[in-house]
Amino acid sequence: MEDHKKTIVDPYRCDKKWKTADYLVIKFFSRLFLSNIICIITWVKQLRNDKEDVMALPKLSDADRKAALKKAVEVRRKRAELKAKLKKGQVSLTDVLNKTGDPVVARMKVSSLLESLPGIGKARSRRLMDELDIDASRRVQGLGSKQRERLVNKLA
C-alpha cells in the first residue's frame, strides 16, 4: 500500500488570484486577530476593488435577444445536420476539417466531431484524442496543422 501524505494547506492563502501584497497583509493581520480573518479578507478585497474579475454583460433589447436566440438555434441546427451527414458517410472528415472558415465547423468541439463519425463513440474518441495529444475541450478552429494531419491519417 502507498503511504498517503497529508497535504499541508496554508490557511492564510485563501484565493490564488491574490497578489503578494494582499497575502502579506492577510498573514500579518490574521496572526493578530485570528478570529476576525473573514472580516480582514473582505476588507482586503474591498481595498483592491478589482474590476478586472467582473465583466459587465451588454444590455440587449428584446429584439436583439430574439435575434441572438434565432441565430443560435440556426447554428445548432446546421451543426446537427453536419453531424448527421458525417454519421451517414455523406461527408468525409477531411472535407469537414478543410472548412475551418465556416463558423459552424470552426466552433465545433473535436470530440463532438469524432463522436459523430460512424463506429466511434465517446470512449474511442477520448482515446484517439489522448493518443494524438488533443485536449478534450479543443475546438476544430484550434487544431494545429500537425494535429489535423495526424487525425486524418489515423482515421483514414
Image: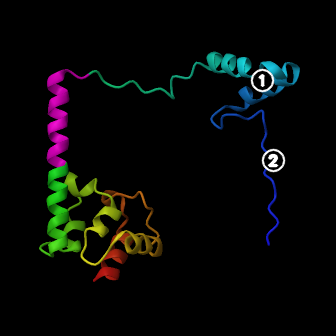
| Region in magenta | 60-75
Q: Residue at x 79, y 39 (%)?
A: 10
Q: Which residue is mark 1?
A: 25
Mark 1 to mark 2: distance in Å? 21 Å
What color scheme is it?
A: rainbow
Could you say which disc has been placed on residue 103 in the image? Answer: none
Q: Residue furthest left?
A: 90
In which quarter of the view is residue 100 placed?
bottom left
Q: Residue at x 81, y 20 (%)?
A: 35
- SS at badge 1: helix
Q: Which residue is mark 2?
A: 8
Q: Residue at x 43, y 61 (%)?
A: 136
Q: Is residue 94 left or right of residue 135?
A: left
Q: Is residue 34 left or right of residue 67?
A: right
Q: Point out the image quarter for the N terminus.
A: bottom right
Mark 1 or 2, nearer chain start: 2
Q: Residue at x 17, y 27 (%)?
A: 64
Q: How many marks?
A: 2
Q: Position of residue 124 (x, y in %)?
A: 39, 75
Q: Position of residue 113 (x, y in %)?
A: 28, 65
In which quarter of the view is residue 118 placed?
bottom left
Q: Residue furthest front?
A: 1
Q: Is residue 116 above or below residue 150?
A: above
Evaluate if marks 1 and 2 touch, with contact meaning CB atoms under 8 Å apart: no
Q: Is residue 149 left or right of residue 102?
A: right
Q: Is residue 71 magenta?
A: yes
